[in-house]
Image (cartoon, grey):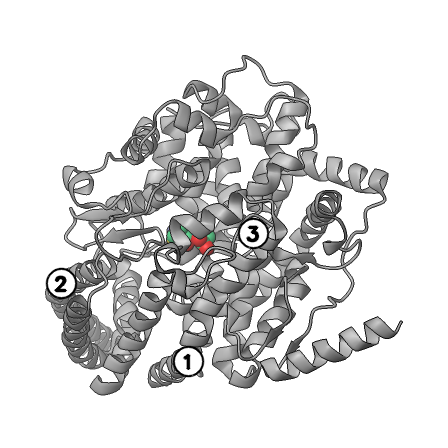
Amino acid sequence: MLPKIFIIGLIHLLTVLAKDASIEEEEYEARNFLAVLNKQTEKDNNRLTKANWAYASNLTENNLKNQLAIAAEVAKNEKEAWQRVGQYNWKSFSDPSLRRHFQKYSVLGTSALPEEKFKQLNKIISDMEAIYSKAKICPRGKKETDGEECKLGLEPELTNILAKSRDSEELKHVWVEWRNAVGPKCRSLYEQYVNLSNEAARLNNFSDTSQYWLDDYEDPDFKNQIQSLWEQLNPLYLQIHAYVRFKLREKYGDIVTEKGPIPMHLLGNMWGQSWHNIGDFMLPYPDVVDNDLTEELRKQNYTATKIFRTAEEFFKSINLSEMPDTFWQRSILEKPADREIVCHASAWDFYDQKDFRIKQCTEVTGEHFITAHHEMGHIEYFIQYKDQPVKFREGANDGFHEAIGDLIALSVESTKHLRKLGLVHNEKDDPKQVLNHLFKLGLSKITFLPFGYLMDLWRWDVFSGKTKPDDYNCKWWELREKYQGVEPPVDRSEEDFDPAGKYHIIADVPYLRYFISFVIQFQFHRSLCEKAGQYEPNNLEKPLHECDIYQNQVAGNTLKQMLAMGSSKPWPQAMEVITGQRRMDASGILEYFKPLQTWLEQENKKNNAHVGWEPSKKVCVRTRQELNEAQKNNTTAFSQT
Ligand code: X8Z
Ligand code: ZN
């Protein structure tokens, strides 16, 4: 006779084995299910991306109709798949990778909406994109009736005026008219968009769209981490802000106050998000030769294709992939003259493992040269993770996707590399030149940070309902002032809708990704430069801002390994591959700009430049009529004194 204890033990063991066997069987079946589903998702995504591309590269009614019809069909398939996914007990699977794959399919997104509402939402977004992309304004001093001349669009005309003109009245005109052309037409559409988007989020069990967006970061504390990063970076921003305001006041006089926010039409960019276009008249050392990248590219007969070939060569040199032939055949690298397209630069994955494209209305400028690297970084990510299941063909998080091309551009933009490309001629850098260079880069990177943060601070409160439609515009200006210390060139009202003047707002593209990118690209840069032996902490001979990882395959292979993971693992794991650390960290960008920060602090002291800002004198009220009355009273008050 077997002892009782032994029999009980045996029964227990058999039960465990049987359970294990049934879990194993279930997981085996689940894997097969996902393999089939993956194929279907691949096909559907391919069809949908082709339709989206067709519309974005030719904004016709017919292409829109086709895009909406295909999107609705794909949404139907997604809903069915989602229901089948729900029948699996996937949360108790033993394989974490399988669980993660199911988890990705368990969030349905906007396809959760009833068909009519889904179509409505897509149409609203496409309509806003068309309004934005087709908007045209007249030059200063011309009226609609002047016909032919009133054809200034955002890219390239208005962007160029903002970048080059130093006539504050012309700048103000373009700034105001762009917003007049887009804002009011989008306001009611945007309100409908917010409602439908929230409805979809709730059907996915999120309280609103802001929660849905934040869910991607897989960390309930993410918002706090972002806030803390911003707080660490704010002192550096305040220094460059103070210096720029001081210089703008020298140039433009009293329209720039000594202590107030900066009138943003003077910053060289339609949204005041990047200020590098005004660097030429405020360099720390104006007397040393300044390398103008735009000028050099033009002198050397660069074309759009040559810019992209140059970018490709860098990626290849670190053992990343070349662009496939179809990339060169199907991409749109210049603005077509015969039709309206969405010009905002973008990179496209067609989910068939071979078709990848860029659409960019490339101009031969330094800015577009960098954007070309940015876009190609997206393509490189697509290529490296192409063998993952479709649901893992994403960045580790969306900030990672945005950071890759910029990370490469940090090497490309170093004087050392530009010299290799023959785009800088002097043999050696003197320290003054290095500082000028760092300052120009700071005008794109540091100044962007508060903008990158506040775009979604605004949207989070809009989606959660904390900001009501009646306050949309004034709340926007409140945040612009609070974080960026900028103000509009003229008073605003709720009859304007200025957020719509920025592409990502009307195109339903979350923006926190860029803030994340601008922080982590410097972390990545520091780690890869260390691997390449080009940077050592505290070694003045090897500073971070002079590192160029060109041709360094050790650095390239590390990057490649991270890219190939896609989103198959939580993002801290991907970050660990490159940096050995699992957290976002402001110390990379702070270290990069340390010499600039020190210089700015001294200079601001020397100039007695005010750091920070007092409240703006510009107002934001409900109606234009209220505004007119306030202005009339103001004038009377003014004339009486
Ligand atoms: O939208 C872009 C890229 C496409 S993902 C051109 N960027 C942001 C912007 O233009 O506002 C790059 C930097 C910020
Ligand atoms: Zn991008």
Q: Residue 68 carries which label?
A: none
Task: Quote the CA–CA distance across marks 3 and 1.
Answer: 26 Å
Q: Residue 194 carries which label?
A: 1
Vertical side of 101 occupied by 412: above or below = above
In contact (CB < 8 Å): disc 3 and disc 1: no
The quarter of the picture where the C terminus appears is bottom right
Residue 548 at x, y = what percent? 47, 27
- Residue nearest the viewer, comparing 546 with 97: 546
Q: Is residue 614 left or right of residue 520?
A: right
Q: Name the residue under label 2.
A: 47
- Secondary-structure class at tag 2: helix
- Secondary-structure class at tag 1: helix
Q: Is residue 526 left or right of residue 231?
A: left
Residue that appears at 17% across and 65% down: 48
Mark 2 CB lies closer than 8 A to ligand 1:
no
Instruction: Tell me if I can see residue 262 in this picture.
Output: yes
Residue 436 at x, y = what percent? 63, 30
- Secondary-structure class at tag 3: helix
Tell which residue pokes out farthest to the right in this image: 641
Q: Name the residue under label 3.
A: 448
